[in-house]
Amino acid sequence: MTDAGRFHVDPAISILAAGMPSLSPDDFQALCHLRVVHRFIGRGRSLLSAGEPFQRLRIIVKGWAMHSRRHHDRRQILDLMLAGDVIGLETDGQHLPLTDVEALTPCEVGEIDLKSLHRIALRSPGIAGGLTRIVAKQLARAEDQILRLGQMTAYERVCHVLLDIHDRQRAAGIDGKPVDFPVTQTVLAALLGLSVVHVNRQVMRLREEGLIVLTRQQLVLCAPERMASIAGIRPLDRGGSSTLAVAAE
């Protein structure tokens, strides 16, 4: 990849390129020439709405969002989206989004015109392959959520999601032992398919066992390897940005 230190690279482009490890210097230059528009989205505002046409890929530069889907008047949270995540690649056959994305905290997003991105991807196997890789990681995260809801106990689910959030932030380059955690237990319960009371019990248990220190805004994992063992995660699966597979017995 071309040395990005020679010129200013938009942070949204840096995030996008980080998910495309096979880029050539020319591919990277092509990405850097894409126009990026930065927007600031307030807490509770929509970043993407299911079924509504959209023209721009959105990259979260700062902040947290939640990825959800509605069934009648009920909503299932599918995933938490952090800085470094990409919004707008998962669509139906008519290129319409399948899910909603809502800001959990104030967010800064970088927007890139989808037609311009697709145009350069047609000329670049590295960029096309990189976009496919990003989508594959998103699908792997969806599989993790299915596994969490279908096969894990409440205790395992909470261990799994806290470890996931911790590892994803570390993989994104966040230093220091505490990581951000601006998530209410109500949101965590909706993500994990549990009641708020049940989530609270599991969090209290993890605290009492000395495995976590959790406040309203920060999370510290005191024994991440033990938590990985509880959730059935092999060390080699702790890549931090996508899949956290359950170890085979």
Image (tube, rainbow, N blue to C red):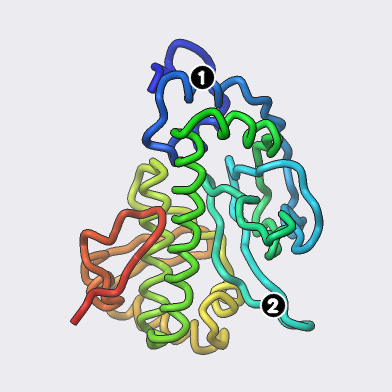
In the image, 108: left or right of 13? right
Q: Position of residue 185 (x, y in %)?
A: 56, 75
**Residue drawn 42% across and 15% down?**
5
**Residue drawn 53% across and 86% down?**
194
**Residue drawn 63% across and 34% down?**
117
The foreground one among 131 and 40 is 131
In the image, 64: left or right of 173? right
Q: Amino acid at mark 1?
A: Gln
Which is in the foreground here, disc 1 or disc 2? Answer: 1
Q: Position of residue 85 (x, y in %)?
A: 54, 49
The residue indicated by pointer 1 is 29
Residue 126 sits in which quadrant? top left
- Residue 75's label in the rendered image is 2
Q: Are marks 1 and 2 in contact (CB under 8 Å)?
A: no
Mark 1: give few (<14), some (14-19) or many (20+) Cα within 10 Å.
some
In the image, 139: left or right of 71? left
